[in-house]
Amino acid sequence: MAYGLEIKRTAQRSLVRRARTAPRDLERIEAAIDQFALDPRPPGAAKIRARPPVWRLRVGSYRVIYAVFDAEQLVVIGKVERRTERTYSDIEELFR
């Protein structure tokens, strides 16, 4: 079963910035996001919150923060950021 993909505005802005500053990294990030349609919990993904089920996937020095909604067959990409102290700070607001 294929999952649908939704990319929140925050993540879209981050991807646009990567296109200008780090095109190679963007290719790797986009490839990882595309794979979520087939397997929303790939090897290396870690669950970081239970409700909604929020996961993170490390792609180089970046983290893709996303939620998986199995009932709707949907993966929502909330954030794509370099790993810093703030990376996980606003997860509560991302998936409201």
Image: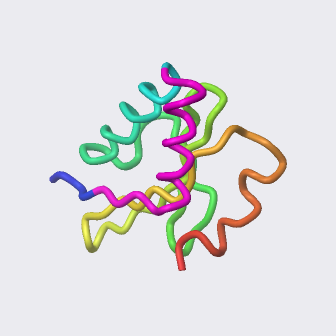
Locate residue 54 relative to residue 42 in the image: left or right: right
Which image quadrant is residue 63 in?
top right
Q: Residue furthest left?
A: 1
Q: Front-most of 58 and 5?
A: 5
The residue sitting at 48% across, 30% down in the picture is 26
Name which residue lies at 24% across and 58% down. Answer: 4
Measuring from the top left, give residue 49's x and y in whole percent: 61, 64
Location of residue 92 with respect to 59 vertically, above or below: below
Residue 10 lies, with reference to residue 40, above or below; the image says: below
- Residue lying at the far bottom in this picture: please name it: 96
Number of numbered labels in the structure image: 0
Q: Position of residue 7 (x, y in %)?
A: 40, 57
Q: Is residue 21 magenta?
A: yes
Q: How is the image coloured?
A: rainbow
Find the residue positioned furthest to the right.
85
If the image is split into quadrants, where does the C terminus sit?
bottom right
* Rendering coords of residue 76 (x, y %): 41, 61
**Magenta stretch: includes residue 12:** yes
Please name the residue shown 38% across and 41% down the image.
33
Nearer to me, 45 or 95: 95
Measuring 54% from the left and 30% from the top, which residue is drawn there? 20
Name the chief secondary structure element in magenta: helix
Magenta stretch, residue numbers: 5-23
Q: Residue furthest front?
A: 20
Q: Is residue 55 above or below residue 18?
A: below
Asked whether, in this view, residue 65 is left or right of residue 4, the answer is right
Spot occupied by residue 70 in the image (x, y as percentages of width and height):
31, 67
